[in-house]
Image: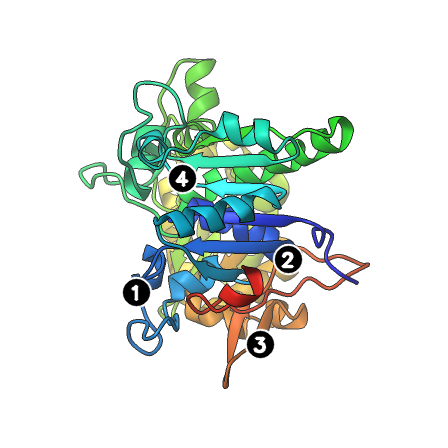
Amino acid sequence: MAGPLADLVVVEQCDTPAGEYTGKLLADLGAHVIKVEPPGGVSSRRQGPFVDGPHVDGTATSLAFWAYNTSKRSVVLDDSPAGRGALAKLIARADVLISTDAPRELAASGTDYATLIEQHERLIVVSVTPFGLTGPWADYRSGELVGLAAGGPLHSCGYDDHAIPPILPGGNQANQLAASFAWCGLLLALIDRGRTGRGQLVDVSMHEACAVSGELANPYWFYPRVLVQRQTCRHAQPVPTEPASFLCGDGARVYFAMVLADQRIWNAVVSWMDDAGLAADLVQPEWTDLGHRQANFGHIGELLEVFFLLQDSETAYREGQRRGLPIGPLRAFEDLPRDEHLQAREFFVDIPDGERTITFPGLPYRFSTFAAVPGPAPALGAHQGAVL
């Protein structure tokens, strides 16, 4: 069966990961997403790493472009009267317009969202910008690092050693947050249009998306008025918590969430270490007291470090899971295609792309009534004739 969004026509005018990912979420579920690009293509086509070197003759080999633009169709329109006229015709028959233009860019192009919605009453405009369309920062320039820093999450990202400044996490997380909120806002606008017959403007600010996504930092500040502190490989907290990343004998690491207050976890860990002859004094009665464990966690941590160093990561992972413990290996990305669970669920999919086949990450959800498989990212202007 066709995807659930097969009836939607979407015009995407985006040159940021936040906007492109919003369009991808729609396209992979069947929407007809028309990616409008300037001559030369959007900037993500020129962002490395590349598979075969930089793009040539409109053929995209950028992993960034591939990742954020699956299942879309590409047209190239310039800023000439003919180009603007073609864009106006596309918007006239679209259900959704996704744009990452800031107010200064809208003013320069003469675009007015209110007028567009008035002219096309069913049109939903999704604006995804760094700081929203209004306010004193509306025209400020931004990016991934600025988004996470100004929005707050970067304060929680880093290491136990606070001499090391906050660390930018990978994965375009500020942009991903903005795209997630844009996706939710669009779905709500579609539901509302089904009730009223009218579209509307969905104004998404990456800054605000980050500001409400500060995880534990927000509630700790709003209620007890305390600040969280960065920690290595675990949630930021007002006071340090137990280390969770342990090096194994094969040079790999496992993540083990050792919750001292959970008596079941404690008993399982001590039993595991005792079976290996490495529990030392942890079997003594005083360690059943939570206060004693908390006061002496340094000693527990030292024993755990030795315990994990004396086994390989796969053994620790399998045996810990068998005993009902929250433990798992820290996978490098290049190891994921060999992950047996992802393989069993057929998460990675092979997509034909011209004369070659490319392995892509699949979609993070499954449906029982239709198949949702991403299509290849488009070559520049590949659908010019068909779309226009």
Q: Which mark is residue 323?
A: 2
* 262 sits left or right of 236 in the view: right
Q: Earlier in the sequence, mark 2 or mark 1?
A: 1
Q: Amino acid at mark 2?
A: Arg
The answer to which of 63 and 1 lies nearer the viewer is 1
Q: Amino acid at mark 3?
A: Asp
**Label 3 sits on residue:** 350
The answer to which of 379 and 280 lies nearer the viewer is 379
Q: Earlier in the sequence, mark 3 or mark 2?
A: 2
Pinpoint residue 200: horizontal percent, then vertical percent.
Answer: 60, 28
Q: Nearer the viewer, mark 4 or mark 1?
A: 1
Q: Amino acid at mark 1?
A: Gly
Q: Which mark is residue 74?
A: none
Q: Secondary structure at mark 4?
A: helix
**Label 1 sits on residue:** 48
Q: Secondary structure at mark 3?
A: strand
Q: Nearer the viewer, mark 3 or mark 4?
A: 3
Q: Nearer the viewer, mark 2 or mark 1?
A: 1
Pinpoint residue 237: horizontal percent, then vertical percent.
Answer: 40, 30
Spatial separation of the CA atoms under disc 3 and disc 4:
48 Å
**Label 4 sits on residue:** 297
Q: Earlier in the sequence, mark 3 or mark 1?
A: 1
Q: Nearer the viewer, mark 4 or mark 2?
A: 2
Task: Report the quarter where the N terminus lies.
Answer: bottom right
Q: How many marks?
A: 4
**Pointer 3 and pointer 4: residues touching (CB < 8 Å)?**
no
Q: Amino acid at mark 4?
A: Phe
Pinpoint residue 34: horizontal percent, then vertical percent.
Answer: 53, 55
Callout 3 crowding tier (Cα within 10 Å): few <14, some 14–19, many ≥20: some
Which residue shows up at 59% across the image and 35% down it? 124
